[in-house]
Amino acid sequence: MPTTHRRAMAFDYGTRQIGVAVGQTLTGSAEPLTNLRARDGVPDWDQVGKLIREWEPNVLVVGLPLNMDGSASDMSERAARFARRLNGRFQLPVETVDERLSTFEAKQHLKSQGRTPSSYRDDPVDSLAAALLLQTWLSSQSKETP
């Protein structure tokens, strides 16, 4: 049962930071929102809840960092666990998307704009990576809906 217009919130999972982006199926666009600090992959769940209440997404999207051959990695298992916890805590549908190379692509995007940070710790790319993986998910939605 496809929903015509959905707001989505995407998460680029990491052990120290989790990038967050928002987008919608109406325009098929996504934009970086924020980077959340994480402690060994665990975010401040109150912050996550605040973002969800503020943006009111219909679906949450989590990137799975698969190995280049498509197999699961330790990080993809952790991201899948994070996705299950999002679903359990917020009772929203959670979908996953293959996010191989999204962080690399985000760094390349920043370089093409002349914004090469000396340290990605000072200028994180996680929210941009979340927007890129959300863009991938949004593109797949437009192909699935008539």
Image: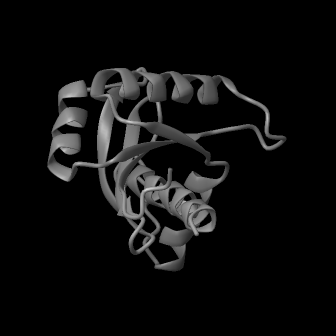
Image quarter of residue 64: top right
For this orientation, the residue located farthest to the front is 1
Residue at image point 29% right, 29% down: 90
Horizontally, residue 88 falls left or right of residue 14, namely left
Image quarter of residue 77: top right
Q: In this view of the protein, which residue sits in the foreground, 113 or 27?
A: 27
**Which quadrant: the C terminus?**
bottom right
- Residue 38 in the image, given as x and y percentages of width and height: 34, 29
- Residue 116 in the image, given as x and y percentages of width and height: 47, 67
How was this image coloured? one colour
Give the mark count: 0
The answer to whether residue 30 of the structure is visible from this angle is yes
Horizontally, residue 130 falls left or right of residue 45, namely right
The answer to whether residue 119 of the structure is visible from this angle is no
Where 11 falls versus 128 (above or below)? Answer: above
Where 56 falls versus 5 (above or below)? Answer: above
- Residue 73 in the image, given as x and y percentages of width and height: 70, 27
Q: In this view of the protein, which residue sits in the foreground, 8 or 108?
A: 8
Q: In this view of the protein, which residue sits in the foreground, 123 or 24?
A: 24
- Residue 99 in the image, given as x and y percentages of width and height: 61, 48
Horizontally, residue 8 falls left or right of residue 94, namely left
Residue at image point 18% right, 28% down: 46
Where 28 falls versus 32 (above or below)? Answer: below
For this orientation, the residue located farthest to the right is 69
Residue at image point 29% right, 49% down: 57
Image quarter of residue 86: top left
